[in-house]
Image (spheres, coloured by chain):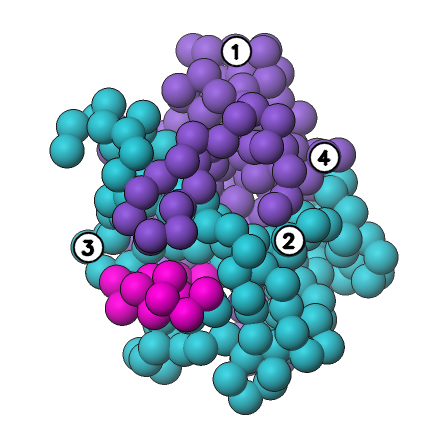
Chain colours: A cyan, B purple
Amino acid sequence: MDKHDIEEGAVFAPRFGADGLITCVTIAAGSGEILMLAHMNAQALQVSLETGVAHYWSRSRGQLWRKGDTSGQVQTIVEMRTDCDQDALLLMVKVGGDGHACHTGRHSCFYRKVGADGKSLEMLPEAAQHSHG
Amino acid sequence: MDKHDIEEGAVFAPRFGADGLITCVTIAAGSGEILMLAHMNAQALQVSLETGVAHYWSRSRGQLWRKGDTSGQVQTIVEMRTDCDQDALLLMVKVGGDGHACHTGRHSCFYRKVGADGKSLEMLPEAAQHSHG
């Protein structure tokens, strides 16, 4: 598949990295809030497409991971997009349970901003986590 | 730095992968539209923090890349966030020039959605690219 087909074509040909993984950005359908960044291997992508529920590959545990399996915060996929060179995925999801995507109990994993000094982190109030800067 | 400090602490300690890179999700400040996914090495991050303008590491070209250098679509960083385990960055930017982030001339790199068959891609109309599903 040449560059033009990859970028402009109608064939979904996800490009997994040397580690067999593709990066996924997961956002809340509707609000567009960025929830988390995770990875899929080919199996996780296939199962996600078949079931309509987000499955990832856990790099730390080295296993297929149905998000929300233990917490109840299952992510139902509303829409999946890919980017120009098809080496990234965008998942728009509805989150079950209490709606939190982060294992720390927060809505989003991106709950801290980098300070002006470039060295410190500032905890964002819950409301600010939902804003887009 | 232990897990609690990484997740709850006030010290920015970005975790680069074995390839020396950290993944960045870049969104439009204000609208929250997902523009692109890219990578930074330590130098790209440092220069981005020092200049307030997004610099990435081009994996294809193997070089530091000041986004918009040739196109004029420079990305001014409004806010930078990191995630729970500090292995991903979120950049909220204002895009210069014609406001396009994708090298194909589109506003966002995520201009196609995966079809219901899981094998085809559908081009999204420009307006739909800005919606969050």
Measuring from the top left, give residue A8's x and y in whole percent.
Answer: 32, 26
* Mark 4 to mark 3 CA distance (whole Å): 34 Å
Image spot of residue A76 (x, y percent): 55, 66
Number of other residues with Cα within 10 Å of mark 1, as a class: few under 14, some 14 to 19, many 20 or more: some
- Relative to B85, is A9 above or below? above
For disc 1, the marked residue is B72
Say which of B71 and B127 sits in front: B127
Where disc 3 sits, the SS reads loop
Type of amino acid at the residue the image marks with label 3: Ala
Residue flagged by tag 1: what amino acid is it?
Answer: Gly
**Residue labelled with disc 3:** A18
**Which mark is on residue B31?**
4
Residue at 73 percent of width and 43 percent of height: A132
Q: Chain under label 1?
A: B
Query: Range of the magenta residues?
Result: A38-52
Discs 4 and 2 carry the same chain letter? no
Q: Which residue is mark 2?
A: A29
The amino acid at mark 4 is Ser
Query: Dot 3 surroundings within 10 Å: few (below 14), some, or many (20 or more)?
Result: few
- CB atoms at circles 2 and 1 under 8 Å apart? no
Q: CA distance from mark 4 to mark 1?
A: 21 Å
